[in-house]
Image (cartoon, rainbow, N blue to C red):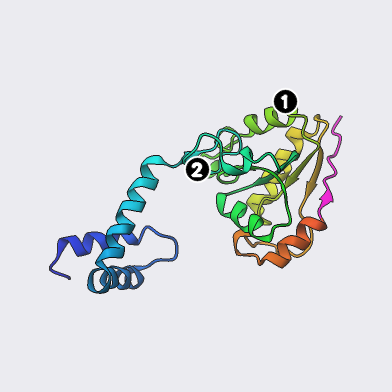
Amino acid sequence: MISSPLIEKLIESLKCLPGVGSKSAQRMTLHLLERDRVAAKALSVALSQAADQVGNCTFCRILTEESICGICANPRRDKGSICVVESPADVYAIEHTGSYRGLYFVLMGHLSPIDGIGPAQLGLETLLARVMEENIAEVIIACNPTVEGDATSYYISEQLRETKAILSRIAHGVPVGGELEYVDGGTLTHAFAGRRPIEVEDNE
């Protein structure tokens, strides 16, 4: 047990990060305190400002400190297509490839009744309204190829089936069970280029 409550508190705080256990948190803490107090203070300020000021874009729900993010406000983006993703990290991954020039809609998760995440939490009513009001020509569903992602994709396609938009889903190259933020840029580029229409069954 370390005799410093402040050091213990910092270590515990860093453990909230994904993939960071006790050893990693301890290593980060000691590095900042031993070798780089300036970086530690800069990190503290930046984190505090981001936590206080960053919210969600009114249109696409990506994280931003502005009411409308830079992508949605960019007049050079293709306003006729929307790519639906699960998280802001997916947007960053797709943007890094430079292969897509349309707009986005960030679900901030996937359907998970056990966790209390339903259509309302994912903003699907907002998505439907955007597609109808903005006369969107194509909706590209780029949910992760997991069980939850597939269920979410199916639900979205069912909700959008009566709209005029073409529904498609990114295709080959993305491994089943994987997550977009960990897929390399070349694979994502091919997945977008090879996207395929979604066939929605008519239950009537």
Q: Which residues are magenta?
A: 195-204
Residue 201 lies in magenta, yes or no? yes
Q: Is residue 126 above or below residue 63?
A: above
Q: Which residue is mark 2?
A: 64
**What residue is rendered at 49% in x and 38% in y?**
66
Neighbours of disc 1 within 10 Å: few (<14), some (14-19), many (20+): few
**What residue is rendered at 80% in x and 30% in y?**
163
> Does residue 64 appear in the picture of this structure?
yes
Check the picture and name the quadrant holding the N terminus: bottom left
Q: Nearer the viewer, residue 128 or 130?
A: 130
For badge 1, the amino acid type reads Glu
Q: Position of residue 155 (x, y in %)?
A: 70, 39
Specify the quadrant of the image occupied by residue 154: top right
Q: Is residue 120 above or below residue 21?
A: above
Which secondary structure, mark 2? strand
**What residue is rendered at 76% in x and 59% in y?**
191
- Camera-side mark, 2 or 1: 2
Question: Which is the main secondary structure of the residues drawn in magenta?
Answer: loop
Q: Is residue 170 above or below residue 108?
A: below
Question: What mark, if any, has residue 133 been given in the picture?
Answer: 1
* Disc nearer the start of the sequence (2/1): 2
157 left or right of 106 in image: right
Q: Position of residue 63 (x, y in %)?
A: 51, 44
For badge 2, the amino acid type reads Thr
